[in-house]
Amino acid sequence: MLAPLHSVNTSQPPVTHFPPEHCCLSIDHLSLAYAGKEALRDLTLSIPRHRVTAFIGPSGCGKSTLLRAINRLHDLNEAVSHSGQIVLEGQDIHGPQVNVTELRRRVGMVFQTPNPFPMSIYENVAFGLRLQQRLPKRKRDDIIEWALTSAALWDEVKDRLHRSAWQLSGGQQQRLVIARTLAVKPDVLLLDEPASALDPISTLKIEELIRNLKSELTLVLVTHNMQQAARVSDYTAFLHQGELIEYGPTDQLFTNPRLQRTENYITGRVT
Amino acid sequence: MTGVPADTAPSRRRLHWLDGLWPWLCAASVALSLLMLGALLTLLLVRGLGHFWPATLEEVTLRSGETFAGQAVREVALPQQPGDERLYFTGNRDIESVRWRWVAIDDIAMQAQPMDLIRLERSPWDDFIGRLVAIEQHDQRWEGDAAWQQLTSLLALPVSQRPDSQLLLITASGQAVQQPLANVVSAQAPNAMTWRQKTLAWSQSVWRFLSEGPRAANTGGGVWPAIFGTVLMVILMSVIVTPFGVLAAIYLNEIAHQGRLTRFVRIGVRNLAGVPSIVYGVFGLGVFVYGIGGSLDEWFFSETLPSPTFGTGGLLWASLTLALLTLPVVIVATEEGLARIPEAQREGAVALGATRLEMLTRIVLPMAAPAMLTGMILAIARAAGEVAPLMLVGVAKLAPQMPVDGEFPYLHLERKFMHLGYHLFDTAFHGDDVQAAIPLVYATALLLVLIVLVLNLTAIFLRHYLRRQRGSEC
Ligand SMILES: Nc1ncnc2c1ncn2[C@@H]1O[C@H](COP(=O)(O)OP(=O)(O)OP(=O)(O)O)[C@@H](O)[C@H]1O
Ligand SMILES: [Mg+2]
């Protein structure tokens, strides 16, 4: 078991703090609206480095919206307005000196539904690499093998790397997308319900993958599966209607939630 | 059931009756369309290709004692009295001053198909139908069968190597004429030909039709310059319209703010596709030919003024006008392709650190390529058959020079060019001999259909290939 990184401020509402050396990402009074319709309201939380942080909450509560805010995908949508700060490794991601494409490389994102590109498996994983710099083929091949191995996909696809990625099964596609993201060596990996459409075996593979990746990067996981959050995450945040309701170490939040609403949600009672 | 109101039952039964019928209605309309299409193609094929088949020549003796030779073309009922009359193509306009003859069937006393009747295709005159008596070359002379053999061997030589010879001919009515060999394009004795020889002769005339220039004010000869002009113009048009249309579609779909103005522009573009093509021709004439072309002449070709270089209709202006005409088609098709690409694909690329341009060039454009090609296919299909605007901006009845030749800069964009569609129109209505034009009109129409088909198929195969390469269906 990992040593706890946090300290708890017992004032109301309770806030989980991480000392700067353990804090990877801190979100500060973030509010976000789609065309004036509020999706996130005054969110403040920080995410520890080399840990898995899970976001849970009912559908439509803003989990995906929050993940997208972290790698500035909302920039593509003119209708989105936001206020507040997101600070990654001490730097405001909306700051003037930040290079958005470099930020997005550092903050990898795996989407709710697998979205492999219509190219070969190899080219999918090489996509991000080709954007970076010209690598000798040998080196690129090595990185691709490493990424596919890390995503627990190598053995299944090593004989058909040049076949279309769209021929893979849903679970394989999801792992391919993870490998594609890993190939560019991100510091943070955002996973939006990576196992929502998968069978139990593939789900277990992905969970194991998440645990293995923890030593190399910071993970943020959105899930609707309480057992999954309990199994793989170190910290859990419960969101409801765009607000952060409760945030704390996973075992504590699941066994001893401070708020009744959290307990209701975890135990499946209608709120 | 008790809860169901009683009056719903009959209406349900009626729907059932329609249920059995509607697939048949749909199938019938498909069948009807196919039937009409098939009829069109059959007509073009039979009339167009049949024209080149070596037709049997008949020697006809009338009750009046007059004799002539010719090819029977068709029969119609006589206008006032009972019975039919038959149209013969007799040729020999230089000798007998008519080339067609209507003869009442009842007037025919005797009808035969002698083996020695021949038909000469001549230039500048039209066909000769009659008999070959002899060939004279300097002091040599061949007669009878030997003359015929000598003639075929002479015609097998390339034109430049044919010696000076005189053909002594006689018409069916007994009039003797002399004809220099240089005027003869080809010779046939169709009544003496076997099927194999006829097939060979047929393929040769089809080939000459495809590969030679027109003769006799477009009522004879081939259509090669028109084929070339049509294809070249369509290719130029595609080269111009595709990048423009694709860029415009990308702007509308990917870059522009999706507000009221963009919607307005989009509706405008869609409606442009419905503007009559002659209007584009007027625009091309006013803006491209007189406006831009006139200015170009003033700036760069002032030494040749007042005779215009670019200030008159030409290949470039025609291609540009048609590009403008087909631009909406390309824009709409490309936009539809772009809109079909899932947002997740774009986000996936961007989330890996791609810039907007990288996302466009590496994900969006390859995925939209089949749609762009669809746009191009539709553009080609529309442009290849368009005639009206071309008449204003550069098509010619007879272009003195081809738009591509060995002379620098090889591609002459300012030249007028020939076009199959216009050639068809001109042959059908502007020739002095409508009867002779009819089979050529069919043949040209068939060719136009085939060319549009080939151009389209090329683009379709290209699209298929792109899709296969990607292993995707989008
Ligand atoms: N592109 C968008 N435009 C407008 N509103 C949006 C958009 N995306 C999300 N929303 C709204 O924002 C709110 C939060 O959506 P979000 O996708 O973040 O929910 P979520 O927590 O991820 O839900 P789920 O668990 O179902 O994925 C919802 O009310 C949703 O309707
Ligand atoms: Mg979501």
Image (cartoon, coloured by chain):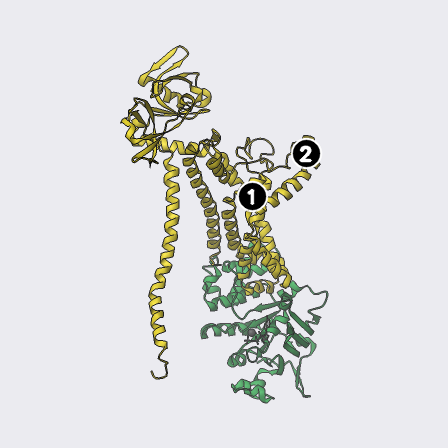
Compared across the picture, whether A71 is left or right of B79 comes to right
Q: Residue at 52% of width from left, 42% of height from top?
A: B387
- In this view, the residue in front, A122 or A239, is A239
Ligand 1 occupies quarter: bottom right
Q: Chain A colour?
A: green
Q: Which mark is residue B389?
A: 1
Q: Chain of mark 1?
A: B
| Three-letter amino acid code at the position of disc 2 | Phe
Residue designated by label 2: B301
Q: Is mark 1 within 8 Å of ligand 1?
A: no
Q: Earlier in the sequence, mark 2 or mark 1?
A: 2
Camera sees residue B108? yes
| Three-letter amino acid code at the position of disc 1 | Pro
The residue at the far front in this view is B80
Compared across the picture, whether B101 is left or right of A64 comes to left
Q: Which chain is yellow?
A: B
Q: Is mark 2 within 8 Å of ligand 1?
A: no
Q: Which mark is residue A213?
A: none
Considering the numbered disc 2 on the image, is that residue within a helix, a strand or a loop? loop
Q: Quadrant of residue A210?
A: bottom right
Q: Position of residue B221 (x, y in %)?
A: 45, 30
For residue B198, above or below residue A54 = above
Q: Position of residue B417 (x, y in %)?
A: 55, 36
Q: Quadrant of residue B142?
A: top left
Q: Position of residue B68 (x, y in %)?
A: 33, 24
- In this view, the residue in front, B287 or B73, is B73
For residue A268, above or below residue A64 = below
